[in-house]
Image (cartoon, coloured by chain):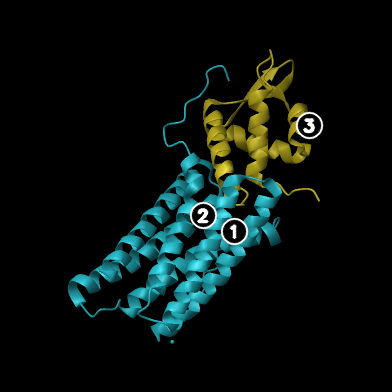
Chain colours: A cyan, B yellow
Amino acid sequence: MEFFFEIILNLVGLLVGLVIGTISYIGFKNTASPTLFRLSIAFFAIGIGFGILATGFILDDFIFKTGDINRGISTLGVASQTVGYWFIAFSHTIRTFFPKSRYFRSIGAIPLFLVSFNYIENILRAVSFILLVYGAIETLISYIQGRKKTTLFVAVGLGLLAFGEFIGWYSFVFPETVLYVTSIIIKIGGLISVGIPVSKIPLRKISFDENL
Amino acid sequence: MAEHRTQMKIVGEILDTATQEIDEYEGTTITHIIRKANISHGRLSRILNNLVSQGLLEQVTSKRSYRYKTSPSGREFLVAYKTFREFSDDFGLTI
């Protein structure tokens, strides 16, 4: 039953991540904006991360039946999410620290994580937490400057994702507790909050005023 | 401190100016775009040539001077730009 719950929650994460990623990619295709390209990579990676975790739970529930997700798959899922969070933080770093540097705008340095899967997973969760806190703070600063409500939703969403990572990290210290499920619920809430701006994007074909 | 504008933002402002400032001669002058988009003549010339070659702006000759107006695909780009600029702003990012 617990696995079923985790599968559903991770699938929701997959869906939300892919929707935001797709919208960002459509934006990139229409405007060739590097910011939207980075956002699409970020949310595709986050969505795929949730998808990998869902696959891990499904495989164990229906095939392996060990009662625990394979650590390799779990680490892969968390790593994918970390890459996504890294790209969000990277976009903020460019805006804040390198506003005029073409070099830093163009590079897409890939973080290298090279030790047991459990150990790596803990490191990844810690890195994700730091990246998310950074992203949340930067977005909050943007909200203070622009006072856009949707920016606040994104800041709160990133904050919830960070809190979810923090709780998820603790689930390793206290396994077999509700901490993991709680972390997933908080993360899904964060993803939904982050996805609120998507609801404002017109998905119908854009029409033009002939008198324009 | 002055806000740094990305190339994308400058292009958006140029297209916006060329769309809004259509007078009886059809199109707007370089001087007007310079004033509205707050950009140097040298840099604007390069961007205008680029936009014309990509079909986002149309160059028309009027009274022995060049004027510029946004093409249909330019307007399409402008609508997409404005939509996704809002989207980027929501994430606290600049398009």
> A129 above or below B35?
below
Q: Position of residue A196 (x, y in %)?
A: 49, 47
Is there a contact, CB below 8 Å, between mark 1 and mark 2?
A: yes
Q: Nearer the viewer, mark 1 or mark 3?
A: 1
Residue at image coords 59%, 58%: A91
B23 left or right, relative to A36: right
Report the amino acid beneath label 3. Answer: Arg
Q: Nearer the viewer, residue B10 or A60?
A: A60
Disc 3 residue crowd, few under 14, some 14–19, many 20+, Cα 10 Å: few
Res. B35 mark: 3
- Which residue in the protein does label 1 denote? A91
Report the amino acid beneath label 1. Answer: Ser
In space, the residues marked 3 and 2 are separated at their CA atoms by: 33 Å
Q: Secondary structure at mark 3?
A: helix
Q: Position of residue B62 (x, y in %)?
A: 70, 16
Q: Position of residue A198 (x, y in %)?
A: 48, 45
Disc 2 residue crowd, few under 14, some 14–19, many 20+, Cα 10 Å: many
B36 left or right, relative to A2: right
Say which label, 1 or 2, has the lower sequence index: 2
Residue at image coords 78%, 39%: B40
Res. A39 mark: 2
Chain under disc 3: B
> B26 above or below A65?
above
Chain under disc 1: A
Report the amino acid beneath label 2. Answer: Leu
Q: Secondary structure at mark 2?
A: helix
A76 left or right, relative to A166: left
In space, the residues marked 1 and 2 are separated at their CA atoms by: 8 Å
